[in-house]
Amino acid sequence: MGGVKYAVIGAGAVGAVVAEALHQGWKDQAAALADRTRIEGIAQSGGILINGRNASFRLVPFDEPRPLELAVFAVKGYQLERALEHTAPWISPETRIISLLNGITSEQQI
């Protein structure tokens, strides 16, 4: 399994589609980041479905950080602060960040 370079934070409807697209291009270098409890819950529920098909992207726990080339934030506004705390060890000065959040304050927070 290769190291994660491209990550989506938030594996809901939008994040899952973006994570799947990254996986198609970069395979094991792409993943969605989540806490272990969420990863376990997803596994117990049978995985993530996108348009009725099982998603093929990896879920990687926040507690296994390594520098990212790209971080895509796809969480809801009220989840952003917690997502930033969990993701901070993954971010370097070279990391490119894309925000898929609505609102005018999320970019300032990120």
Image: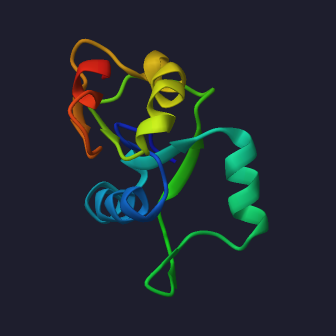
Relative image position of residue 10 (x, y in whole percent): 47, 47
Relative image position of residue 94 (x, y in whole percent): 21, 18
Residue occupying the point 30% across, 54% down = 26
Residue occupying the point 68% across, 48% down = 38
The correct choice, above or below, for 48 with respect to 31 in the image is below
Task: Please name whichever residue, 33 or 4, is drawn nearer the observer in this view of the structure.
Answer: 33
Q: Is residue 50 left or right of residue 14?
A: right
Q: Looking at the rendering, in which quadrant would you find the C terminus?
A: top left
Task: Please name whichever residue, 36 or 13, is drawn nearer the observer in this view of the structure.
Answer: 13
User: Residue most toward the right?
Assistant: 44
Q: Is residue 55 left or right of residue 19?
A: right
Q: How is the image coloured?
A: rainbow
Relative image position of residue 89 (x, y in whole percent): 48, 16
- Quarter of the image where one finds residue 16: bottom left
User: Residue most toward the front?
Assistant: 104
- Quarter of the image where one finds residue 68: top left
